[in-house]
Image (cartoon, rainbow, N blue to C red):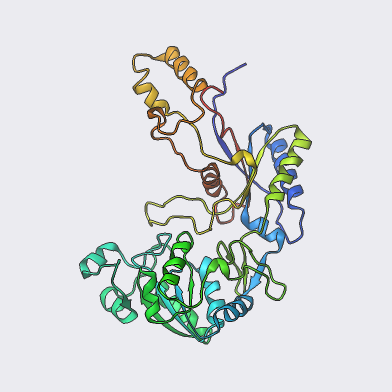
């Protein structure tokens, strides 16, 4: 047998435009198999078929409207003055949710974290913060003070001044608005006791701090639209978290329970090819952009559903460590043989072992989901499926 010269391969797979009610498991299966036939590659055991969350939610018809959000917010928070704290700065992710929230309130006190939001979108540079002598950990700034110190600050990538954009959006919905800047959750309690905390990955801590501080009604975005409103879609686990703008008045929610989908795709492929593949649904990857400082993950998780073979973390040896240390005296075929034998004999758990230092012990779904997110892109590539081959190979395969 000739030696394989290629390791991991990630392929974007084209498929038809998905609509509500489509048999997504069948569409994914046929799209992958047709791509394999057209491009001349074979499906192998432990290949990973990844499906973007957007087509899953679309096939489920998991949408709600701005008015649905308004109705839910009014029912839960009373329709008076509500603190809306720690939202991310995003036209696609949050602005349409904010429209719904504003329509369900008389007044919003919008509290923005600074110098950036939770996922790294910058309101003002740290250098400007330093020059102004502001302590972002403790100082609460009014809108007037913010403008006096920092003026207008447009987002590096979108060109939007989110302070103005969010303020005007709230007013356009017939709701009063007051904007403040703070990083301590309890700062909002000086303005109102009823709060929607919009942070994603820190939401449990924020809720705890607010409740311990004497807040009244506290709901996270994960608790808004967590049940249907007048027959709308919903997400029982994540509410509005992970949602995206669909139209000017409609939100596409994060997919509902979809473990059955990944299991169905896995079974379809096994039935048609005899190969046991892994399958996952993925949203945002988890990586940080060095230019804009944005940490991509605006979804509550990278993968809301996956087959059991994707549970856990990699268990890998660092080849360059072995080459530079244990086998520094070897080269050529002898070095290759020694490293191959080390891989075959490696422990089932390498945590804490020097030979694994510098490997990436993140969850497999986070690593593969990030690879898939970069492969499929967020624009017009038209490849909402990604086939990853060779991910579980090592130097000996």
Is 278 on the left-hand or right-hand side of 269?
left
Residue 283: quadrant of the picture: bottom right
Residue 25 or 306: which is nearer the viewer?
A: 306
Residue most toward the top? 334
The quadrant in which residue 116 appears is bottom left
Which image quarter holds the C terminus? top right
Q: Position of residue 146 (x, y in %)?
A: 30, 76
Q: Count the labels in the image.
A: 0
On the picture, is 14 further left or further right than 365?
right
Q: Is residue 88 visible?
A: no
Q: Nearer the viewer, residue 393 or 91?
A: 393
Give the residue drawn at x 63%, y 41%.
Answer: 308
The part of the image, by quadrant, that contains residue 159 is bottom left
Q: Position of residue 247 (x, y in %)?
A: 62, 71
Residue 203 appears left or right of 252: left
In the rendered structure, the answer to whether residue 18 lies left or right of residue 240 reads: right
Residue 56: x and y in percent read 67, 56
**Which residue appears at 34% of the width and 14% of the height?**
329
In this picture, is 126 found above or below 326?
Answer: below
- The residue that appears at 69% across and 37% down in the rendered structure is 36
- Does 104 appear above or below 64? below
The answer to which of 94 and 352 lies nearer the viewer is 352
Q: Quadrant of the N terminus?
A: top right
Q: Where residue 75 appears, x then y in whole percent?
A: 60, 80
Q: Is residue 335 above or below residue 182?
A: above
Whether residue 101 is visible here, answered yes or no, is yes
């Amino acid at each position: 047998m000739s030696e394989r010269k290629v390791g991991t391969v990630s392929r974007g797979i084209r498929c038809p435009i998905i609509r509500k009610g489509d048999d997504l498991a069948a569409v994914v299966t046929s799209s992958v198999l047709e791509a394999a036939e057209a491009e001349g590659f074979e499906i192998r055991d432990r290949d990973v078929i990844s499906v973007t969350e957007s087509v899953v939610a679309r096939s489920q018809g998991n949408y709600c409207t701005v008015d649905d959000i308004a109705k839910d917010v009014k029912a839960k928070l009373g329709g008076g003055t509500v603190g809306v704290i720690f939202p991310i700065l995003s036209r696609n992710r949050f602005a349409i949710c904010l429209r719904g929230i504003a329509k369900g309130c008389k007044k919003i006190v919008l509290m923005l974290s600074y110098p950036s939001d939770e996922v790294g979108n910058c309101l003002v540079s740290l250098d400007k913060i330093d020059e102004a002598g502001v302590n972002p950990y403790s100082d609460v700034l009014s809108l007037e003070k913010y403008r006096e110190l920092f003026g207008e600050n447009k987002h590096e990538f979108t060109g939007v001044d989110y302070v103005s954009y969010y303020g005007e959006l709230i007013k356009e919905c017939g709701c009063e608005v007051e904007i403040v800047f703070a990083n301590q959750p309890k700062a909002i309690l000086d303005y109102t006791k009823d709060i929607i905390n919009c942070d994603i990955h820190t939401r449990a801590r924020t809720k705890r701090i607010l409740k311990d501080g004497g807040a009244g009604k506290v709901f996270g975005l994960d608790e808004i639209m967590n049940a249907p409103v007048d027959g709308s879609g919903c997400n029982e686990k994540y509410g509005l978290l992970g949602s995206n703008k669909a139209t000017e008045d409609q939100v596409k929610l994060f997919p509902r329970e979809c473990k059955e989908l990944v299991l169905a795709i896995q079974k379809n492929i096994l039935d048609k090819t005899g190969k046991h593949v892994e399958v996952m649904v993925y949203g945002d990857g988890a990586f940080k952009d060095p230019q804009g400082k944005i940490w991509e993950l605006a979804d509550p998780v990278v993968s809301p559903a996956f087959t059991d073979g994707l549970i856990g973390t990699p268990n890998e040896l660092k080849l360059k460590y072995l080459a530079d240390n244990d086998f520094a005296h070897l080269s050529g075929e002898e070095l290759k043989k020694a490293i191959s034998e080390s891989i075959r004999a490696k422990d089932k758990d390498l945590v804490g072992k020097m030979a694994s230092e510098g490997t990436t012990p993140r969850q497999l779904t986070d690593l593969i989901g990030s690879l898939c997110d970069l492969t499929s892109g967020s624009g017009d590539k038209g490849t909402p499926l990604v086939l990853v081959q060779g991910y579980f190979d090592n130097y000996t395969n």
